[in-house]
Amino acid sequence: MPHHGNEEEHNSSANQEPVIRDNRKVDPVTGRARHPEGEQPAEAPLGESPVGEPPVGEPVDSDGDALAQAEEILNGIEVPAEESVAQGAGHAEAAELKNDLLRLQAEYVNYRKRVERDRAVAGEMAVIGVLNSLLPVLDDVDAARQHGDLTDGPFAAIATKLENALKTYGLVRIDETGVEFDPTIHEALIQQPGEDIEVDTVSQVLRSGYRSGERVLRAAQVIVAVPA
């Protein structure tokens, strides 16, 4: 009689897939060491984490958590007192150097203005020196004109050109009559009583005066008419 029970066992054994056991001590996927059942993995030293991926069952920190942790670490770092003092000294030195630079700049601006002013004064004094040296020549020209020697001819033209050239340098003649006497531009040589006048008045110019701008080169010598 055939044994049907043995045939069924044989068929079920034939259909069952073989079991393959992985006895490797290192996980080929994670790279972590495997431990036999019942053994606990060695704990990592304090402050360190196992090499590779995070422990199984613990989520990976997000970017926000990482930034928060980094910020906490940076805030917890204390700057040595020596570095703080050095930084304060550096700021103070920079401020002092800036003040020195501003002071030097102000001194340079004042120096430049003073040089320009001195140059202008020197040029004005040079012109005045030349004009003063030519005043006797102008007196001779006036005398020749009063005597009728410069009514016509080449010398009259030369005298006119000279006077016009000196006017370009600011030379102004003081020779007006009938004006109020001004002691700053007039030199009274003679006083005469006048009629119908209320203040001292220049009645005649004996020698012309000259000025250049606001500077009087020579006062005019005049005869003054005073109230009677």
Image: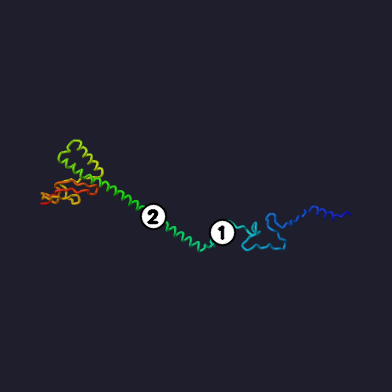
Between 124 and 178, the one lying in front of the other is 124
**Residue in the image at 85% along x and 55% along y:** 6
**Residue in the image at 87% along x and 55% along y:** 3
Quarter occupied by the N terminus: bottom right
**Residue in the image at 62% along x and 57% along y:** 60
186 versus 80 height, above or below: above
Residue 104 disc label: 2
Residue 44 % position (x, y): 65, 62
Residue 31 disc label: none
Number of residues whose C-alpha sits closer than 10 Å to that of mark 1, classed few (under 14), some (14–19) or many (20 or more): few
Q: How many marks?
A: 2
203 versus 56 height, above or below: above
Residue 83 % position (x, y): 50, 61
Q: Is mark 2 on a helix, strand or loop?
A: helix
Give me the C-alpha separation between circle 2 and circle 1.
Answer: 47 Å
User: Which numbered disc, 2 or 1, marks the residue closer to the eye?
Assistant: 2
Q: Mark 1 points at which residue?
A: 70
Q: Which colour scheme is used?
A: rainbow
Amino acid carrying mark 1 in the image: Ala
Amino acid carrying mark 2 in the image: Leu
Q: Is mark 1 on a helix, strand or loop?
A: helix
Between 33 and 54, the one lying in front of the other is 33
92 versus 116 height, above or below: below
